Image (spheres, helix red, strand yellow):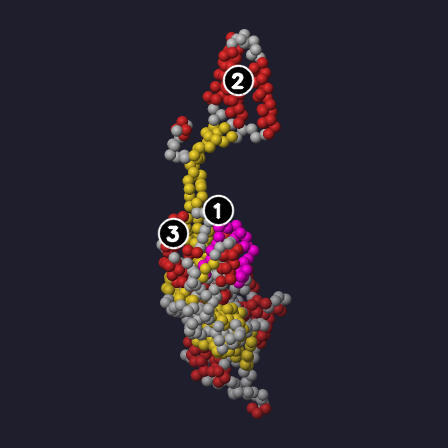
Amino acid sequence: MIAELFDLDPEEFNQIDILWSGIDSPFLWLFLALTIPLSLRFFWTSLRRISSRPRKVFLIFLRLIAFALLGLIMFQPQLEFRNNQTLKNHIAVLLDDSKSMSVKSFPEEIPRTDLVKKWLERNAKTLESWNRDYKVEYFFASDTLSPTTSKQLPDQLQARKPRTDFEQSFAKLKKRYEGKSLQGTVLVSDGVDPSQGNGELSPGFLEILAQMEGPVHTVLAGTRDGYKDLSIQHIAVARFGFLNQPSRVVATLNATNMGNKNVSLTLKQDGKILTSKLIPLKEEQTEYLVELEFIPATLGKKNYLLSLPVFSGEAISENNQKNFQVKSVRDRIRILHLNGRPSWDSRFLREALASNPKTDLLSFFILRTLDDDVSASTAELSLIPFPSNLLFTDYLDSFDLVIFQNFQYEPFIEKRYLSNISKYVENGGAFLMIGGELSFQMGNYDRSPIEEILPVKMTTVPNGYLSNEYKINPVENYKSHPVLALDNHLEKNKKIWEDMAALNGINAGLTAKPNAQVLAEYQIPGQEKTLPLLTVWNKGKGRSIAFATDSSWNWNFIKVGEGGSGRQYYKFWNQLISWAIGEPETQTLRVAMDKEEYREDEEVLIKLQVLKEDYNPSPNEKIHFTITPPNGKKVEIDQSSGENGELNLHYQPKETGYHSVQIKRDTQEEAQFIETGFSVSADNSEFSQAQANPELMKKIAQTTSGQFIHIGSNDDSAMSLHFPDPKKFAHLNNKTISLWNNWWLYGLLTGLLLLDWIVRRKSGLS
């Protein structure tokens, strides 16, 4: 009824209160308590001249009503209409979905998640009864908090989150229920939390638990009984190693309840066993430190697998192996240098090669041949037989680069050994032939296996070696080539080559093969024909170079004689050797990974720079990626390079382990490809100490006055878990109406004072 007087819906409001928001000063209250009685006393005295008693009473009545209205104004009363409802308090049920919940429990030999599912099934009626008095909400908890429902639990409860952090998950729970009434929490877990102690809680976690409303009941899944596990806890290995030099990996192993036995730690690469070591396990010892040694046999980043056998009854098998990558690089550049005769060019080149601290140089100089006419007998000459059999059979693959400088192979090398050199290049070696009167067809290399790997064809001509003087003329398109780039700035590089000393002498009768790259050429005077001076190409997996002159020493000798420096000579040869042996900065496909190792569910980024044969960007070129995951099912991806020759491939791996990547281009006659790879590692930090932790679960319950129960024990019923008052009152809506700040109150007060004045005047009072 009252709500209707103020034009309000009575069904919307079920409670009315009067609020007083006026005078709150005790001194003012005291003043009014003294002033009002004195004022009424004075007013009654002033009415003595009025003979009519009813009129006196009427005037006093008017004054009392006026004081009452004035009091309303001073005390400022308000009517508050409220809608109060009874609501249910909350209960939060947290279910651990981290990886440690996949550990099999003894003796059931079933994962801990299955124990939880069976416990939920057995206590379904009890959990349902909680819904009658409380609002029950379910969450998956690890280091995050994910809401779910009771109906979705059986399908969605899986042990897949990488880590548990109770402090973080309870902090998120506390924040979620700010302003709400959380009367209790149920934590269902195995208690495996690497961030907490065995039976002690971190200060941050203790502070959060102290602020929680209601108890935290803990339900333990799993047991320590019969827990058995053999694992690789940690490996320590250098990310870089040297080719054909020993590298070491140190593994930390853990053996829990494995008894006394011998186990083998094995190191593999691409499925091939490199080495292994037998470790005697002792029942009283749990941790072991094992060192293995291996030798990288190929250049580049390679994946290795360290593994232990999986025994029957082990709680976890995922931690019995670990992948790691080592990038092998050259510690030395081994060069075999064969020189047909001593010369200034060979002397300066040998000095340039030997001055590089990374170079391991083996040089052979032919001081005399069988045809040389010398005044001494053969017995008196200090000559040794040329070791062609050792060099070109047993030790050939140990060299990174083979140089023939003005060298005629007969009679020192049998022709059959030339085939070995050809195979050496096809399989990834490097070969350089430097010109002179004993090189190319003048050294009888035409129609030999050496011609097959050289980037030039040889033709017999009357004058096979021209002694002309000339300035080197780099071909315009190849001025950015790594061999010719003596300065990164194009104009400065051009000026350097213009200032280089003139050469004298060039091999004639040479023509570049298809797909070979002529970096510098000689224009024959009076003819349109040019001779290739410096020619390179990729042959099979290796590289080959033809440098058709024996006078490059002029760039050092003459420059120094003019008061300059021979550093450009040294830089040229260092860069030529780097290109020949295929250093990463000389590749036309250059790949980079934003990481070497990725976590689960993390996107992989492969960055590729695609260059033409002249080392300028190659835009809009189709590139083929072949990604091979551990399961062997290849993933084929085609993508094109951008206008700047760059390409970014985003890839989402679906499993852990090492993924090899082959990157291939098909713009040349022979497809060019490079290989790389990346590792996707699962965060198995919980598996390092995956035994159930009842001490931690008990401590959480004790700290919050909760209860602890163990799934599988005689008393694991959810009926033993109790919570405080299930109800609370909530103000859903309210509306306040003022009883004093309105026109009718002030109008009534004014009317009473006016009526009082009129009656007093008619009674003869002023």
Q: Nearer the viewer, residue 40 or 467?
A: 40
Residue 444 figure quarter: bottom left
Is residue 593 visible in the rendered image? The answer is: no
Q: Amino acid at mark 1?
A: Glu
Q: Amino acid at mark 2?
A: Arg
The span picked out in magenta is 194-221
Please give the count of numbered marks on the rendered protein: 3
Q: Position of residue 740 (x, y in %)?
A: 49, 25
Check disc 1 and report the residue beneath it.
178
User: Could you tell me which residue is drawn at 56 percent across and 68 percent down?
Assistant: 571
Task: Determine whether label 2 and label 3 are within 8 Å by CB.
Answer: no
Residue 671 lies left or right of residue 333; in this view the side is: left
Distance Cα–Cα, label 2 vs label 3: 65 Å
Check disc 2 and report the residue beneath it.
63
User: Could you tell me which residue is drawn at 43 percent across and 83 percent down?
Assistant: 416
User: Could you tell me which residue is drawn at 53 percent across and 61 percent down?
Assistant: 199
Distance Cα–Cα, label 1 vs label 2: 54 Å
Q: Nearer the viewer, residue 656 or 43?
A: 43
Residue 313 figure quarter: bottom left
Residue 667 lies left or right of residue 396; in this view the side is: left
Q: Amino acid at mark 3?
A: Ser
Q: Position of residue 700 (x, y in %)?
A: 51, 57
